[in-house]
């Protein structure tokens, strides 16, 4: 008997693309996928089909990761319910019983309260990380809810995509185009872009 599985739901952007996994597809507000992407409110829908996002599938094998995801999405109560249910079905251990070595009992999975503190460098290629929070593979989120996706090319992180449902201003400048979206600005540089929180 294994640990009771937490049921994950499939979700996909309305514009298509990969089918991701998440603890629960909310009726309103944004959703964070198991692979760490945040899909903006109204931009996604639940789907019946099996997930085909490799990162989500890989992470769905990791109970600790799933527990964290449930907790992050305020589904901690569901997690607690399942944990208690599991505990109920487990044989109570009487005083004097010594636990059999190698007994195939697995511990109750408790949610991770906080993600482990990671040392984030000031700059990752084209991204000035100050003020951003990591939100999954190469994905960063600003305090104002701007999602920036970086892609690794060789050893360098390069700006790939910015997603924001709000005020966006694109301005022509000598070297190309500057974009201001929410609290983030993307400036053209000699050989690419620089992404950072708006100054001031
Ligand atoms: Zn995914």
Image: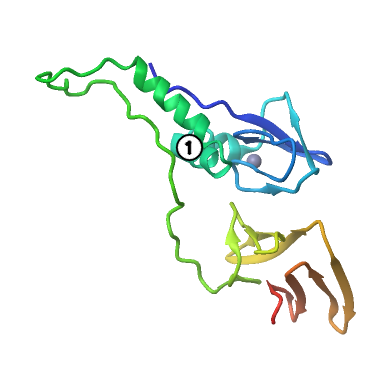
Q: Residue at point 41% right, 27% down?
A: 83
Q: Is residue 68 left or right of residue 176?
A: left
Q: Secondary structure at mark 1?
A: helix
Residue 19 image-quadrant placement:
top right
- Quadrant of ligand 1: it is top right
Q: Is residue 4 left or right of residue 24?
A: left
Q: Residue at point 77% right, 67% down?
A: 182
The quarter in which the N terminus is drawn is top left
The quarter in which the C terminus is drawn is bottom right
Residue bearing the label numbered 1: 67
Q: Position of residue 6 (x, y in %)?
A: 52, 27
Is 43 situated above or below 98? Answer: below
Q: Nearer the viewer, residue 141 or 126?
A: 141
Q: Nearer the viewer, residue 31 or 37?
A: 31
Query: How many marks do you count on the picture?
Result: 1
Q: Residue at point 40% right, 25% down?
A: 84
Q: Position of residue 171 (x, y in %)?
A: 89, 76
Is 156 situated above or below 43? Answer: below
Q: Residue at point 52% right, 30% down?
A: 78
Q: Position of residue 193 (x, y in %)?
A: 73, 73
């Amino acid at each position: 008997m294994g640990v009771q599985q937490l049921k994950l739901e499939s979700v996909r952007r309305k514009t298509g693309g990969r089918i991701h996994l998440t603890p629960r597809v909310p009726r309103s507000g944004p959703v964070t996928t198991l692979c760490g992407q945040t899909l903006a409110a109204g931009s996604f829908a639940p789907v019946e089909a099996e997930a085909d996002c490799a990162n989500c599938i890989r992470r769905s094998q990791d109970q600790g990761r799933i527990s964290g995801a449930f907790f992050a999405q305020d589904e901690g109560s569901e997690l607690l319910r399942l944990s208690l249910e599991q505990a109920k079905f487990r044989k109570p251990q009487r005083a004097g019983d010594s636990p059999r070595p190698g007994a195939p009992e697995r511990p109750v999975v408790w949610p991770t309260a906080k993600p482990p503190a990671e040392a984030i460098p000031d700059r990752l290629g084209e991204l000035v990380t100050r003020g951003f929070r990591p939100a999954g593979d190469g994905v960063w989120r600003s305090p104002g809810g701007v999602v920036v996706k970086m892609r690794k090319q060789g050893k360098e992180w390069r700006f790939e995509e910015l997603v924001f449902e709000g005020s966006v201003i694109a301005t022509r400048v000598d070297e190309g185009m500057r974009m201001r979206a929410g609290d983030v600005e993307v400036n053209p540089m000699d050989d690419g872009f620089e992404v950072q929180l708006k100054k001031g």
